[in-house]
Amino acid sequence: HNYQDQQQQQQQQQNPKDQAILLQQQQVASNIASTLICMGSIYYKLGNRVEEIRMYQEAKSVYRKAFGENHVFVAGTRKNIGMVLAERGEYDEAMAQFEKAMRIYLAVNSKNNRDSPTPTTSSQTSSIPGGDQMLNRDVASAISCMGNVKNRIGELDAALFKYMQALQIYKALYNQAVAESSTSCSPATTEALRDVTSTLKVIGMVHAKKGDLETAMNFFQEAMSLLRTMEVVASAGTAGDSGDTDINSSSNNTTNGTAATCLVAATDAAAAVVRETTASVLTRIASIHLKKGDLDSAMTHYREAYDLTIRNRGTTNHPEVAGILHYIGGIYHKRADYDEAMACYQESIRIYHATLGPGNPTVAGTLVMVGSIHYKRRHLDSAMMFYREALRLNRDAYGMHHPDVAPILKSIGTILTKKGEYEEAYDIFRDVLSIKCTVHGTDHPEVASAYKSLGNVHYKLGDLADAERQYRHALSIYRKCKGEEHPDTVAAKTTIEHLRYWMRERDHRRQMEQRQSRSSSRNNQLGASSAMANDMDDERSC
């Protein structure tokens, strides 16, 4: 912030005319940069990550030239760039952008607190490591973005640490907004509530990924409790404001009417946010029921989320509706009701294409599910067609070395193996291994799974020694990551034992065949000698 102090001193030394010119230049720069960011967001919706990140980088350059490096506008564009890099699988570069953004936010917040005539130190900040400078929405957002990177690369404990840090800040800001607001449905309170509940949802999702379903459900329920409370307040506010303005109060009639209108608008906006976030959390609660095998409860929650989303968006043609239809299709899929599942998936695809365009990678997951139904019905060529289209969308959007690409490649490799095209399947599984090593490092269960896929192809080709070698790689990883008693470790050991047994049997069979071959050869030689002796006896008798 030395740069910002110098900039402020220079501005103070400038005459009013120069200051006005500078402010005008900065306003023009802000308009240009914000337009570039809007263009970037459109490219995001179109699935064009290359152009999206280029727009953000141009916006960053404009902001830096107008305001200097250490400005919140620059930090914001760094955060946007980091999110694109994370989606593309460039995690180190993404983390570097988030860390730079965080340093700017902290420096600016620290300076603002120093310059403020009323320090913000309170009971809200006393429990937050770093104190006042940490009590900032942008700081919490940058920390949460770092958590997203850790989550993507499978470092779940590190992700939880970051998310909990962000949650602590968001909760403090929410309590502060409630205390300072004259109404519980103010924009500041609504925004703070969204931050808290969204972070609670993400924390629950990480716990679910770790297999701790009860803890996950607790976080989801905490989010729901806050949302239900706000929903009641918003409903009461809307009902209460309908007849409170007395049209006969002459002096304050206009003022009261305007205030009431603003309050109703704020209340409606809060209700919309509550419905949107509630629908999102409901889908996560449904996913826990799904993991527990309670398909009926899962369906109930997905249906409620579906109805809320349509009510909130006012149409069925919206990507959020398509996403929930995808989940509902998944329930039918689990029940082996493939016709109903296919109907949901196809409607989801139609909505995605109508709202996002046919080239958006968001639809790839649904294409994969359609492919899996064809696979279960043994329509391998149809399944391959959907898998390859999903692969194309993700590869074009994110590049080849991305976590979303590997599962699709694995499905394609599985079909090739089924069709007996082992050489091509082997090349595909090698690509899967390369991606997973890049994303997760060499000692990760996902990498072990890739080694097993290679081992299976070797087995199909009859290369038992190579199959055993690949499974030994997998076993070594499982032992490090999961321990000796984990089912994956035990299964890998069992497969290796079977492979070694089959290799011993094969070697024994070969030895027996060689002995039989040698014995047959000797018998043939003895037969030939006997025939020669008989011929000689015949000659003598002649």
Image (tube, grey):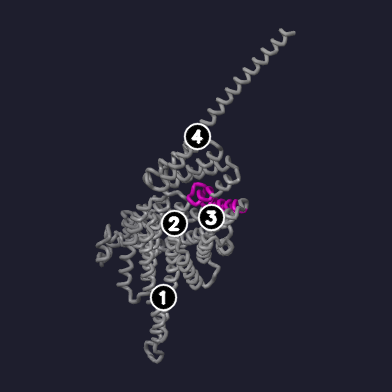
Cα distance in 3D space between marks 4 and 1: 73 Å
Residues at marks 2 and 4, CA–CA distance in whole angstroms: 55 Å
Q: Position of residue 259 (x, y in %)?
A: 39, 81
Work out whether 534 lies above or below 518: above
Measure the C-alpha gap from mark 2 to mark 1.
28 Å
**Upstream in the sequence, badge 2 or badge 1?**
2
Q: Which residue is mark 4?
A: 503
Q: Is residue 385 magenta?
A: yes
* CB atoms of marks 2 and 4 within 8 Å: no
> Tag 3: Cα neighbours inside 10 Å, few (<14), some, or many (≥20)?
some
Residue 293 rendering spot, x and y as whole percentages: 45, 61
Amino acid type, mark 1: Ala
Q: Helix, strand or loop at disc 3? A: loop
Q: Say which residue appears at 71% left-offset and 7% top-offset.
A: 540
Could you say which disc has been placed on residue 80 in the image?
2
Q: Is residue 196 left or right of residue 326?
A: left
Instruction: State how far apart marks 1 and 3 are (Cα).
Output: 35 Å
Q: Residue at x 44, y 52 (%)?
A: 86
Decide which of 26, 183 is in the foreground and name it.
183
**What segment carries the magenta color?**
382-410
For discs 2 and 4, the disc positioned in front in the rendered view: 4
Which comes sooner in the sequence, label 4 or label 1?
1
Q: Mark 2 is on which residue type?
A: Asn
From this viewpoint, which residue is outermost toward the bottom? 248
